[in-house]
Amino acid sequence: MSKFIFITGGVVSSLGKGITAASIGLLLKSRGLKIAHQKFDPYLNVDPGTMNPYQHGEVYVTDDGAETDLDLGHYERFTGVTTCKNSNFTAGRIYDSIIKKERRGDYLGGTVQVVPHVTGEICDSIRSVACPEIDVVISEIGGTVGDVESLPFLEALRIFRMQEGRGNVLFIHVTLIPFLRKAGEIKTKPTQHSVGKLREIGIIPDMLICRTERHLDKDLRSKLSLFCNVDADAVAEAFDVDNTIYEVPLDFAAQNVDSVIIDILGLRSGKRNLAPWRDYVDRVTNAEHTVTIAIVGKYSELLDAYKSIHEALNHAGAANMAKVCIKSVSAEEIEEKGAKAVLAGAGGILVPGGFGGRGVEGKIEAVRYARENKIPYFGICYGMHMAVIEFARNVLKLEGADTTENNPDTKFPVIHIMEEQKRIVNKGATMRLGAYPCALKKNSQARKCYGKDSISERHRHRYEFNNEYRDAFEKSGMALCGQSPDGILVEMVELAGHPWFLAVQFHPEFKSRPVEPHPLFRDFIGASVKYGKTK
Ligand code: GLN
């Protein structure tokens, strides 16, 4: 049966627990072990689908249609292993399930309590991803040790270890080793306190991963080992990386983090093979070109809101030996200053997914600027809606054409709500979600790019292309180059006579991996590098 690794965090948040979990997953996988990742989030929302990107960052969508935490994106990008609904549980989801059981009478009149019911539900959800085919389940616990919200989760892990037996469960604590500039020293005390806090709950970590901006010397590692009751070779550092986050697993490999884990859990494994990974990092380090990509969105200052897009652009950059400089542009700034003033200098323009009316006219202007000046354009989900509206207004001359999302009374509803969405009133998990197949048109740019006739991509939307306008678009040069296999839904459009203008109803960014860049991003960056050079 599977063995289990739990990753907790201490001292502060934002230590990179997700990258740590992902890197460990990659290292174990590179030694031939089968792994599965899981993330627990202690907040009470049932899933992050309804949460504001300012608070939560991007919503990552899985093949089976779950709206999840963005750390699942790291797991998939690092390991290539597909996550699913049971890869992410929030406290809200745990309680939701318990309350449904209670209302059904499943507890037979018993008092429903945090211990054993909430903790039991957490243990069951950990086991839901374990199976004989998986060697190791790696579960990351969101939040920081000492948070009120995290307590039931940590309590559950203590019980889980007792149930599974010591040799089958490993605890890794990710912590901060601060550097005090005036004292010229790095400090271990916050880590000692944080480990002490874990021990109060009955969890003794087997391994420490110390986030630090200064390297830990041998003495410091011994001190941490002594005070925190962790073997000296199980004290590792997570040094701040400047180049790319994909260096972290190489750094862990150099410290034999995987070997320590394999020893403690008594796993049988092969030799580590990180050659494709090293090749990727080398490509990033030795980039020959530079290209600027303008992302025109609502959350220009918020990096995490478009996390997977940023990563996919970086993967595509490495495939083209190019460093991608991302220029985050607020669509409202384009409304104020005009597209040229804001977008001049960009090698390519990307409009990502989005919701609602704010900044929409600026996004449509960005599309017009890209179309008229033959600048590579990539529209994703809302970015496809914007491309369709722009073409309708400025090429088909359908004045006031719009999406009914923002303008229900428009005379030309070129984008409208999907039939299956019309009767839905609940907000959570009610969109068209998850992977759907798409057939590509012969001789299209899309077909050439993917190199196959049929693809599968992940969706998250309520609105779609209005089929009444199919002929008008096709006749005027916007090809409906990707459709659902039954031919009912338009999933991709492209422009004839433009060097690279593609817009898609799905989110290709979720499936890009450093060692397997997504073809659409790869070719968009290829075209953008080329355009950047001709200017
Ligand atoms: N707001 C649009 C819709 O719901 C697009 C969604 C998105 O970009 N993810 O259809």
Image (tube, rainbow, N blue to C red):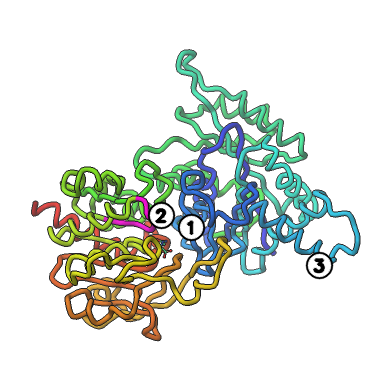
Q: Give the labeled residue for mark 3.
A: 104
Mark 1 surroundings within 10 Å by alpha-carbon count, few (fewer than 14), some (14 through 19), many (20 or more): many
Q: Residue at x 34, y 57 (%)?
A: 352
Task: Give x and y (percent) for residue 103.
Answer: 80, 63
What's the amino acid at mark 1?
Tyr
Seen from the viewer's position, the closer of residues 377 and 151 is: 377
Closest to the observer: 289 or 23? 289
Within 10 Å of disc 3 (Cα), the crowding (few <14, some 14-19, many 20+) is few
User: What span is colored magenta in the figure?
Assistant: 350-358
To which quarter of the image does residue 229 belong?
top right
Foreground residue, 52 or 7?
Answer: 52
- Which of 45 and 61 lies nearest the eye of the viewer? 45
Regarding mark 3 in the picture, which secondary structure is present there?
Answer: helix
Estimate the spatial distance between the alpha carbons at disc 3 and disc 1, rounded to whole Å: 32 Å
Q: Picture coordinates of residue 517 (x, y %)?
A: 34, 61
* Residue under pointer 2: 308
Q: Earlier in the sequence, mark 3 or mark 2?
A: 3
Was residue 510 drawn as part of the magenta stretch in this picture?
Answer: no
Q: Which residue appears at 70% of the width and 51% of the height?
A: 169
Image quarter for ligand 1 equals bottom left
Residue at which label 1 appears? 60
